[in-house]
Amino acid sequence: MSKPKLSDEEITQRGKELYDSSIRPRVETPENIGKIISINVETGEYEIGDDLLVTSLKMRTKQADAALWSGRIGFNAVYAVGGTLFRAIG
């Protein structure tokens, strides 16, 4: 597997921009709140599921070297270690 062409900072920036500008309105529905989304920041394709590893692996089957950004739909982070997840308000 080759290394993504983008830096971690570029992946984060593109992922957040894609999510906020075009994906959020389609996926932030009551049935998806709290689920994980993994986004290929180069193509805009995404997978939604209950598990970060599963959504990432599904994206990697489509493109092995995909630059992926992941988030928890409706929240400020995927996981909270020693803290609390906060519900993101649109």
Image: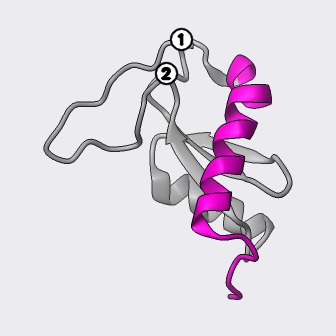
Figure quadrant of residue 77 = top left
Q: Residue at x 67, y 84 (%)?
A: 3
Stretch of the chain drawn in magenta: 1-26
Residue 79 to residue 41: above or below: above
Question: Residue 47: horizontal and vertical position, in percent?
Answer: 67, 45
- The residue sitting at the right extreme is 43
Secondary structure at numbered mark 2: loop
Label the magenta part by its dominant secondary structure: helix
The residue where tag 1 is placed is 30
Residue 30 to residue 82: above or below: above
Label 1: how many residues lie within 10 Å, few (<14), some (14-19) or many (20+)? few
Work out which quarter of the rendered image holds the C terminus and state it. Answer: top right
Residue 54 to residue 74: above or below: below
In the image, 90: left or right of 89?
A: right
Question: Residue 60: horizontal and vertical position, in percent?
Answer: 69, 68
Label 2: how many residues lie within 10 Å, few (<14), some (14-19) or many (20+)? some
Q: Residue at x 52, y 42 (%)?
A: 71
Question: Residue 1: horizontal and vertical position, in percent?
Answer: 68, 88
User: In the image, is residue 8 part of the stretch drawn in magenta?
Assistant: yes
- Distance Cα–Cα, label 2 vs label 1: 6 Å
Mark 2–mark 1 CB contact (< 8 Å):
yes
Kind of residue at badge 2: Ile
Q: Residue at x 54, y 17 (%)?
A: 31
The residue where tag 2 is placed is 33
Secondary structure at numbered mark 1: loop
Q: Residue at x 66, y 58 (%)?
A: 11
Kind of residue at badge 1: Pro
Q: What mark, if any, has residue 7 been given in the picture?
A: none
In the image, 26: left or right of 37?
A: right
- The residue sitting at the left extreme is 82
Question: Residue 8: horizontal and vertical position, in percent?
Answer: 58, 66
